[in-house]
Amino acid sequence: MNRLQVELPGLSLKNPIIPASGCFGFGQEYAQLYDLSKLGAIMIKATTLETRSGNPTPRVAETAAGMLNAIGLQNPGLEHVLAHELPWLEKYDVPIIANVAGTETADYVAVAEAISKAPNVHALELNISCPNVKCGGIQFGTDPKSASDLTAAVKAVSDVPVYVKLSPNVTNISEIAKAVEAGGADGITMINTLIGMRLHPKTGKPIIANGTGGLSGPAVKPVAIRMVHEVSRNVNIPIIGMGGVATAEDVIDFLSVGASAVAVGTANFVDPFVCPNIIEALPQKLDELGYDKLTDVIGRSHR
Amino acid sequence: MIHQERMQVVRQQQIAEDIFELTLTGQLVLDMKQPGQFVHIRVTDTFEPLLRRPISIASINHELLQFTMIYRAEGRGMTILSAKRPGEEVDVLGPLGHGFPVEEIEPGQTALLVGGGIGVPPLYQLSKELHAKGVRTIHVLGFQSENNVFYEKEFSELDDTYIVTADGSQGTKGFVTDLLRDKAPEFDVFYSCGPTPMLGALEQTYPDKKGFLSFEERMGCGIGACYACVCNTTDATEKEYLKICSDGPVFPRGVVKL
């Protein structure tokens, strides 16, 4: 028996550890360091219909136990990802979760339809929560009706299950979660980054050229844990939790509040081996807690 | 090949105002193949400060499995690093990036090496390798003030070295380009590392010369995955953008839009 096995819509995961979208490119860089087949799945960088060149630099700024980023969804575009990045990943025994982004419904639908047909894409992650682009993205993720309608439109064309990535930058995250569930979402991934700003001490102006950026890293974990805790009680679809995950203990926390798997983002920059290290550490964590298998931990906060 | 290794501190000393020289030892040194590459340093095992710090490699000693970095101790991370003592460990990811191409100049030719402030260190290993190949070098090193000057002796022992300070407290007063205009040195290839305006000024000063420039930008992962340190390109390349960490930090002149 594989103690770390998790079954989710479209995803048979040999372990619950998934590099988060935007923190792992399309896998090539980390493949220089370890075998990507060790991972539960990979959430590839957000893909849009056309090439996007992203925001001006500086794009990152360090904060207390965290960082701000405003990359701006830079990616080579759908055609390139289908022709190069996804085929390159086929040599690894790892399901791909394709993060789909756009500025209007038609873009999302076009990307979702095409990318869901790629043989190694087992699920989509609908990005309605990027805080760093002017149009689209978070606009869909902060209004329940828009979120629900977009989910339904993407579900209608996707060949694989659709997970919707939620923004924490809302008053009532359960309302959005319930809306995307009603729209037909197969699962939820949460949380995207929190909008923040860091000033240059000399000039008093924002360091990041975009002004604001998305806060991530260990600093945001309590916010993410609280939101997963709440949303898991309000929806009946699985959640992939993320936000500040850097250790096996963090993974256990996210599972405890109801996540079924966990994405690791910023921690990859701090320790490029963090994902395989966590996977290796998990069985011992289960032993310490007295659980046979990882799925026994899911939702224990609520029991 | 990129490695992550806990390397041991051999030596640490302050060599100018806020400037420290740190020598580490470990197997990772064997993979340092080119001057101008960098390492990504984690200064603590906690999450505060969180990110790694990119630092250029100033000199490499393959026999002793040692390499030396020179950095400015400003900000939380570098201040923590400056407190490391011999025997303590430092978490190093590297070697990273593409450095200065030594093969782009022939024995007997002359290289102009222009450094600005904390951009000076990688030029030291470069100069040593150029000399080993039989290339003559001219060093032009710019600093804010005499208190910030370092490695004048080390560079002078290799070849002609000119110091420029913004306030004139040592060497020539002004910018490196002022000195270059006055001296008008004869050379075949230029190599440079320093503030972006200085790199731009060099490109303008020598429109017809072959040259290689090392860039700097705030980085996240250091290996090309996060797209934090991209730069725009000119028509000289088909690529729409380049990543400073993994495509660079050294690029041929004229490729990066300045």
Image (spheres, coloured by chain):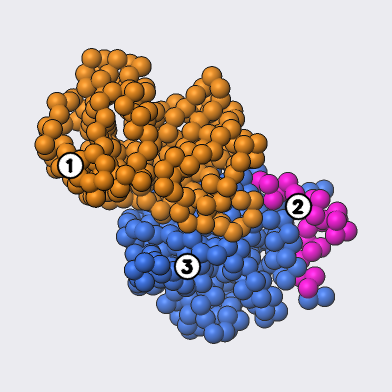
Residue B177 numbered tag: 1
Image point 82% across, 75% down: which residue? A303
Task: Report the front residue among A242 and B251.
Answer: B251
Spatial separation of the CA atoms under disc 1 and disc 2: 57 Å
The residue mark sitting in front, 3 or 2, is: 3
Q: Which chain is orange?
A: B
Q: Position of residue B49 (x, y in %)?
A: 56, 57
- Write down the chain letter for disc 2: A
CB under 8 Å between callouts 1 and 2?
Answer: no
CB under 8 Å between callouts 3 and 2?
Answer: no
Magenta-colored stretch includes residue A289: yes
- Give the residue pinned by disc 3: A214
Element on which disc 3 rests:
strand
Q: Position of residue A127 (x, y in %)?
A: 48, 67
Magenta-colored stretch includes residue B234: no
Q: What is the three-letter code of the residue carrying label 1?
A: Thr
Q: Is residue A122 left or right of residue B215?
A: right
Q: As drawn, which residue projects farthest toward the front?
A: B169
Tally the marks.
3
Compared to A148, does B34 lie above or below? above
Chain A appears what colour?
blue
Segment colored magenta: A276-301
Q: Position of residue A130 (x, y in %)?
A: 45, 68
- Give the residue pinned by disc 2: A282
Element on which disc 2 rests:
helix
Q: Is residue B44 left or right of residue B123?
A: right
